[in-house]
Amino acid sequence: MKRIVIVFYVVVVAVLATATIVEKYQGTDYVGEHVFGAWWFSALWAVLTAVAAFYFVKRKVRRASVIVLHLSFVVILAGALLTHLTAIRGVVPLYQGIATNEYLTRDMYLHRLPFTICLEKFEIKFYEGTDMPSDYVSHVTIDGEPFTISMNQIVNHKGVRLYQSDYDEDLRGSLLAMNSDPWGIPVTYCGYALLFVSLVWMLADPQGKFRQQLSILRKQRFPLAMLTAFLMACFVLLLYHFLGKYSAANHPLPVLNSRLLPLHVSTIMMAYTLLLLTFIISLVGIAVSKQRQKMYHLSQVMLFPALLLLCYGIFIGAIWANVSWGNYWSWDPKETWALITLMIYAAPAHRSFSNMSPRKYHLYMTVAFFTILMTYLGVNYFLGGMHSYA
């Protein structure tokens, strides 16, 4: 059964990676229809979840923190399936002064909205003293009540979420995207809550693998305080560089004007800092045979908080997207490769990896680092996508 789980796990990762390459040459709509939106893709995730759950139950895991952690992923996937099966999406073309109660689906069919909406005014806001846009704003009335819809500010009315998508060049028309997902979002958010709690629980659990590896390092009198100071210095430098790049003074894209940006970026960058360190540690472990075992314990201590931060960063980004644009996951290349990175690095956190020799472990961690390079650099300079500015 363990081998079956591994096979499906590898297949899912391979499909995700391949899809991003195909998207580069065939386009987003093609992979959206033939991969991410296809029945077989959902079935593949369902089979992986089923066999993994069966194996998990068969192993009779009793640690509550581990159970809640794995349950959270099942709940998140269940929410994603509900969204896929029940969510309604479309666009609402608006023209100034003309009321409408219809939206257009992807297959170009008109459907009724549960309200009437009218565009009163559309405007582009600019950074002071520049011609750089800071926001796109639609002033609308819904059933006679005024609302403002802009980048990072959606309107939720009668179960329909409306968010700014595009506009006419003459500024007399606006295109709103609409999303109605009353079942998938609550289930998915419940899964996120379980995940956030269980990840911290895993680090605090005295019987957990992280605390055990930490105890071993303490017995070896490893200078953990010095290492922590080094990590914080690296983190501050990376964060200063990244957030400085997208500060208001540098006129970032309107989509980046969100209070969640610093939180999203800081968690992701700290995770990458820790995983960079595991890469360096593994290089030492491969080169110096006498230090392999110690480097293994040190790498494990870095790995667990890195996974926590990476999970937090990914799902904070998903929440940001849902709050701002009504869609918490779009299979953008950056999102997909971040998920691939998480899946690749989650494997050595399992106890089954304890049977692997330190040398093989370090080789795995060295190869795994290339998923970060692909996520951080490959997407920006090769694959493109919504996150290619990051």
Image: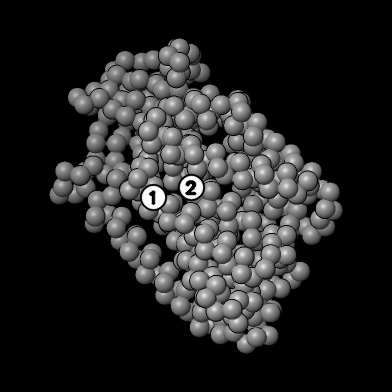
Residue type pointed to by label 1: Gly
Q: Position of residue 284 (x, y in %)?
A: 52, 75
Q: State how many labels appear.
A: 2
Give the CA separation, mark 1 to mark 2.
Answer: 9 Å
Residue highlighted by disc 2? 337
Q: Is any atom of residue 205 visible in this view?
A: no
Q: Is residue 92 above or below residue 67?
A: above
Q: Left or right: where does residue 312 sit relative to residue 208? A: left
Decide which of 372, 140 is in the foreground and name it.
372
Residue highlighted by disc 1? 378
Per the image, label 1 sits on a secondary structure element best described as helix
Q: Position of residue 296 (x, y in %)?
A: 62, 72
Question: Is the residue under label 2 in contact with that under label 1 (CB below 8 Å)?
Answer: yes
Q: Is residue 60 above or below residue 387?
A: below
Residue at 73%, 65% in the rendered image: 355
Q: Which numbered tag is attached to residue 359? A: none
Decide which of 156, 80 is in the foreground and name it.
80
- Give the mark nearest the N terminus, 1 or 2: 2
Label 2 Cα neighbours within 10 Å, binned few <14 / some 14-19 / many ≥20? many
